[in-house]
Image (cartoon, grey):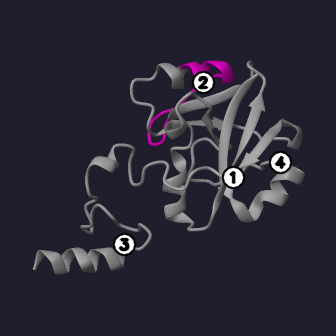
Amino acid sequence: MATFTHIFSADDRVKIAKNGITVAKVSWRKINGVFLSPVTGNYYYTHQWKRELKRWQNVPKLAVRVRLHDDEKVFVGKYNEEHIEVSASEAIKIALNHKAPGGLEVILPRSVKPKELMQFYKPNENVGWRYRPDSNSRKPCWCFYCQRGEPYSSKRRKEYEADDS
């Protein structure tokens, strides 16, 4: 059985425990499904999306372990690149053997049933990356081009422009 982690808003804990995780369908996404991270020996990469998700919705986050059959079909790939369809066990092997697993995501193209949920827990606060996987080593650029439509971008741009003058 392959094990994955799903990060979600703490407000949804009771609903998810009762009904499972449902697929949010949006027209602009190529593949709709439940977003998961493979559970590997590396805590950082297993929970890498926590900080980026907090940027968009600043509420406490929880995580749940999801157990899938090894032959379950999922899509795996970097967050802004093409995804490939593989089995759940192959997705974990890809994550373990990947040279740079930052930004790697697994998409399950169906809802997760409550019986597939294993354990709810609160991940460490300061885990993950923001903006992009390699961003921890440098400050973000707050110019208009780089931060169009990002949360808090107008406030940050004003600070950025004040520092330049």
Which circle's residue, 2 or 1, is located before the other in the chain? Answer: 1
The answer to if 136 sits in the magenta stretch is no
Percent position of residue 150, x then y: 41, 66
Badge 1 amino acid: Lys
Instruction: Work out whether 155 lies above or below 56.
Output: below
Q: State which mark lies toward you, 2 or 1.
A: 2
Q: Is residue 9 left or right of residue 153?
A: right
Q: Is residue 49 left or right of residue 73?
A: left
The answer to which of 34 and 89 lies nearer the viewer is 89
Percent position of residue 32, x then y: 65, 44
Which circle's residue, 1 or 3, is located before the other in the chain? Answer: 1
Report the magenta residues as a range. 78-93
Screen quadrant of the N terminus: top right
- Mark 1 and mark 3 in contact? Answer it, CB < 8 Å: no
Q: Residue at x 35, y 77 (%)?
A: 154
Judging by the rendered image, the residue that carries numbered circle 4 is 20
Helix, strand or loop status at disc 1: loop
- Mark 3 and mark 2 in contact? Answer it, CB < 8 Å: no
The answer to if 91 sits in the magenta stretch is yes
Which circle's residue, 3 or 4, is located before the other in the chain? Answer: 4
Q: Residue at x 61, y 41 (%)?
A: 31
Q: Which mark is residue 153?
A: 3
